Amino acid sequence: MHNLGDKIPVMRTFLTTILFILLSIPLYAAGTLRIYFIDTEGGQSTLFVSPSGQTMLVDTGNVDPKGRDPRRIAAVAGQAGVNRIDYLLITHYHSDHVGGVPELAKLLPISNFIDHGLEVERDDKAEGLVRDYVQVRDQGHHILAKPGDRIPIAGIDVQVLTSAGEEIASPLPGAGAVNRVCASTPPHLSDPSENAQSIGTLITFGKFRIIDLGDLTWNKEMELACPNNKIGTVDVYLSTHHGLDASNCPAIVYALRPRVAIVNNGETKGGAPQALRTIRNSPGIEDVWQLHYSKNATKAENAPEPFIVNIDRDLTTSWIELDAQADGQFTVTNSRNGKTKTYAAR
């Protein structure tokens, strides 16, 4: 027969073990992934703030003598409580994606620079953009992205799907289904530009998934989706190439089955009618949010006004914020008007 005194050391050992396990669980496990889609007037800049506190910025907006887009990025970063960029991912070397790097580096320290390697466009403008970028990159740590790589950000999984014209060789776990839309999606002419070199990523936080393919063009999208869907489905689709018709092919958009699409268009760049129709016709789509009202489309083809951030191009700093939970629930908010909507975990 055992008395209570005999059990106390065992109980203490048990409680100590449980406490150790609880303290070993990362604090970010129950946190929130915050994503800010920043209006750069038809460029791209998306800030990811991991539950761990680490940050990844995808692209830096346009070249501008007054530094408009870097100042917008820094302002949004300040709103998010961010004072440094841990990882800067440059999808490709076009002025509306890499152009803001020199000025942004003056506003926020940047630790790691991720890109696809050598540029494929050789004109003076393109080489000047890359030269200016590399001068800043050389002050930090350079990471050359390859399909299948992972960006080591604590708290989220960032997987490289495409880079330098190549894509992942095999379907991701759970993906690989035959894509029947491919038969009705004809290819386009081959694209020799930087767009086809874009780094595309899938960002996962628990059950939540968002995809960003940069400016990847039609045929490269099809290589990810045809004849088999290599990615599976996502919760959020950042419209490829600002919602232009040269991208957003039905074969990939329909296969992804996003619940929400974020269109990073400008007033007269992107937001093309065909691309917007493709997104709206995607199976399972619930809402489309836009960074700008598109004058390329009719009012009916644009998202409803509450879901659009910039209506008249007069805003100085505007963004869409997405807060995602590990169970798959996420909330989207328009900074202009406070419009917010929560999408339940599925």
Image (cartoon, rainbow, N blue to C red):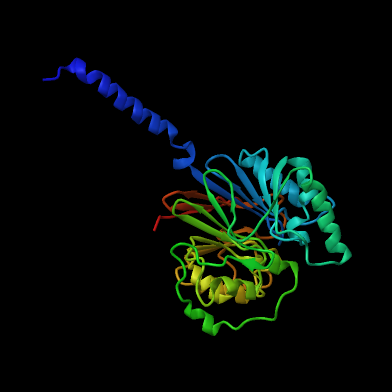
Screen quadrant of the N terminus: top left
The residue lying furthest to the left in this view is 1
Screen quadrant of the C terminus: bottom left
Residue 269 seen anywhere in this rendered image of the structure: no
Quarter of the image for residue 313 reads bottom right
Q: In the image, 129: left or right of 316?
A: right
Q: In the image, 170: left or right of 192?
A: left
Q: Nearer the viewer, residue 234 or 127?
A: 127
Quarter of the image for residue 291 reads bottom right
Q: Is residue 20 above or below residue 56?
A: above
Residue 114 seen anywhere in this rendered image of the structure: yes
Residue visible at 86% across and 67% down in the picture: 123
Residue visible at 47% across and 52% down in the picture: 330
How far across and how far down the image is residue 218, in percent? 64, 74
How far across and how far down the image is residue 33, in percent? 52, 47
How far across and how far down the image is residue 165, in percent? 68, 68
The residue lying furthest to the right in this view is 124
Residue visible at 42% across and 31% down in the picture: 23
The residue lying furthest to the front in this view is 1
Residue visible at 41% across and 55% down in the picture: 344
Q: Nearer the viewer, residue 261 or 319?
A: 261
Q: Nearer the viewer, residue 14 or 205?
A: 14
How far across and how far down the image is residue 288, in percent? 54, 64
- State the count of labels: 0
Q: Nearer the viewer, residue 144 or 103?
A: 144
